[in-house]
């Protein structure tokens, strides 16, 4: 970890515009310029300390030093996260709600979401065989939205699928600072939360009875530590948190499909799948391609780290994307090399595309296991269950857009199914071996 003293300041007085204009590159490029993994700036007028790397992540995810209350910017709460949900809680209040999320993620339920997603994909491929071309990102958003709403125990009619998928996509696609996307995200959240509030009321009154292991049932009946049902709005926000983020997985699957195309040797390795190659490939896609740029927290109590005085309530930003490519932890970080995960020691702080630390004790993503499982099985499916061609298209991605994706959304043609049933992927059990995150 490089730390320059005195801690340097970013060249601009307030970096909000630079963050919007430079996106994923903003934090890594300032660190490079300033030759320091800690630097100061201002964001939305507020003093902010930006940090990166494995050691920085270990401090950031230490509950002694940081809290989430007041850290997330308001627009993000109106769109991506929702208000009052698990993301913004601290202490026992957070642990209590986090246990609820983790109770949904049993090995059986993880296998089930993977199976549902593959079955939706396999059904969709029948349509793709009749189409001239397929825009993979758009199709995967619908495939995953159907699967995950079904998994969550939500009642939806065929005629609702388009609208509900668009709402989920608008929420996930909203976070990079474009005013239009923020507006769309806020509108989508309002409509989606109203729908969920109606469902939760019906579950509570016994009109609708999803199975007791589903997210819909679990959240509707979740009680606060004081023994009261969650208020209706908070319940809708956290029910949404239990399945909406699956849409993010579509972006990463598309990046992985692009990698299979751009690094053709990976396709043959995926087909052979020796040493659990499909798992290593999914991990490398999560490390290499950009999705979540950074996380914000506030200092809980004064402390000194690397000679810098972190003062109570100071805003601190952890560079997630830059930590996944930090040269202290990764050899040749700018290269796409799935095999690097073969002997990987499994640090909970150097590889943090979905947050770091411990899933139970901290804010690390509750959906990380299912993200990896779904990605792994989709990559196997793309490499072994279908054949397709990839026409010329614009596969560049804009690092200033958050989230980002290949500009063409990855178009494929001449899709042909090679196996009548996807059993090879369905019965490839993974849930015991997905992500190690325990802090030792
Ligand atoms: C590409 C896929 C995904 C990415 C990149 C992603 C990323 C993240 C990130 C960066 C965080 C915040 C970590 C922090 O606060 O420090 C998070 C938290 C969370 N994610 Fe995910 N996520 C993904 C998929 C999922 C899925 C599929 C689910 C559930 C179905 C999910 C549910 C959650 C929940 C409930 C939290 C809040 C955890 C807490 O505050 O304790 N995520 N995720």
Image (spheres, grey):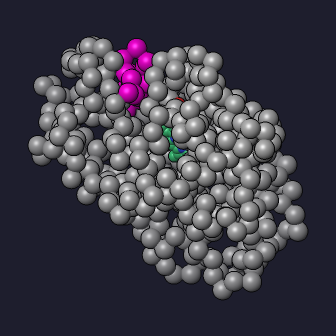
List x then y, in percent, for residue 273: 74, 52
- Find residue 319 and report its image quarter: top left
| In this picture, residue 99 sits left or right of residue 170 | right
> At which x and y percent is residue 231?
56, 32
Q: Is residue 197 above or below residue 165?
A: above
State the image coordinates of residue 218 (x, y, percent, origin top left): 71, 33
Q: Quadrant of the N terminus?
A: top left
Find ligand 1 in the image and state its quadrant.
top right
Q: Which percent across, then down, holds residue 276? A: 72, 45
Q: Per the image, is 57 magenta? A: yes
How many dots with numbers? 0
- Name the foreground residue: 214 vs 131: 214
Q: Quadrant of the C terminus?
A: top right
Q: Is residue 176 visible?
A: yes
Q: Which residues are drawn in magenta?
A: 52-69
Q: Nearer the viewer, residue 358 or 276?
A: 358
Q: Nearer the viewer, residue 50 or 52?
A: 50
Q: Do we see residue 104 in this rendering? A: no
As drawn, the residue found furthest toward the bottom would be 132
Looking at the image, is 413 positioned above or below residue 234?
A: below
Say which residue appears at 27% left-offset and 34% top-offset: 50
| Residue drawn at x 67%, y 64% as measured from the top left | 160
Confirm whether the magenta stretch covers residue 165.
Answer: no
Left/right of residue 240 with respect to residue 41 in the rendered view: right
Q: Residue at x 72, y 58 (%)?
A: 156
Left or right of 383 on screen, residue 235: left
């Amino acid at each position: 970890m490089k730390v320059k003293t005195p801690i340097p300041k970013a060249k601009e007085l307030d970096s909000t515009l630079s963050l919007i204009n430079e996106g994923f590159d903003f934090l890594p490029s300032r660190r490079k310029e300033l030759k320091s993994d800690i630097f100061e700036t201002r964001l939305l007028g507020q003093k902010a300390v930006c940090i990166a790397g494995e050691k920085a992540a270990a401090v950031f995810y230490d509950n002694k030093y940081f809290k989430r209350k007041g850290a997330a910017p308001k627009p993000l709460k109106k769109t991506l996260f929702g208000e009052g949900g698990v993301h913004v809680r601290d202490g026992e209040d957070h642990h209590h709600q986090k246990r609820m999320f983790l109770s949904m993620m049993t090995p059986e339920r993880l296998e089930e979401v993977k199976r549902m997603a593959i079955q939706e994909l396999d059904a969709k491929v029948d349509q793709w065989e009749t189409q001239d071309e397929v825009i993979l990102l758009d199709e995967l958003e619908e495939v995953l939205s159907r699967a995950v709403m079904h998994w969550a125990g939500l009642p939806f009619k065929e005629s609702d699928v388009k609208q509900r998928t668009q709402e989920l996509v608008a929420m996930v696609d909203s976070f990079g600072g474009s005013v239009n996307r923020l507006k769309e995200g806020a509108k989508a959240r309002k409509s989606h939360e109203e729908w969920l509030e109606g469902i939760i009321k019906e579950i509570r009154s016994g009109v609708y009875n999803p199975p007791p292991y589903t997210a819909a049932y679990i959240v509707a009946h979740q009680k606060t530590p004081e023994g009261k049902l969650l208020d209706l709005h908070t319940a809708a926000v956290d029910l949404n948190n239990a399945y909406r983020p699956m849409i993010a997985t579509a972006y990463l699957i598309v990046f992985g499909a692009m990698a299979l195309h751009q690094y053709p040797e990976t396709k043959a390795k995926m087909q052979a799948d020796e040493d659990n190659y499909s798992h290593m490939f999914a991990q490398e896609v999560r490390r290499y391609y950009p999705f979540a740029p950074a996380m914000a927290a506030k200092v809980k109590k004064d402390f000194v780290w690397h000679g810098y005085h972190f003062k109570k309530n100071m805003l601190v930003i952890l560079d997630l994307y830059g930590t996944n490519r930090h040269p202290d932890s990764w050899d040749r970080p700018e290269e796409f090399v799935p095999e690097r995960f073969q002997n990987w020691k499994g640090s909970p702080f150097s590889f943090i595309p979905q947050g770091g630390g411990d899933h139970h004790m901290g804010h690390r993503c509750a959906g990380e296991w299912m993200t990896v499982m779904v990605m792994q099985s989709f990559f196997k499916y793309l490499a072994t269950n279908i054949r397709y061609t990839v026409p010329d298209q614009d596969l560049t991605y804009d690092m200033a857009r958050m989230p980002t994706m290949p500009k063409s959304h990855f178009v494929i043609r001449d899709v042909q199914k090679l196996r009548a049933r996807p059993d090879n992927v369905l019965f490839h059990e993974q849930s015991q071996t997905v992500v190690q995150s325990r802090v030792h």
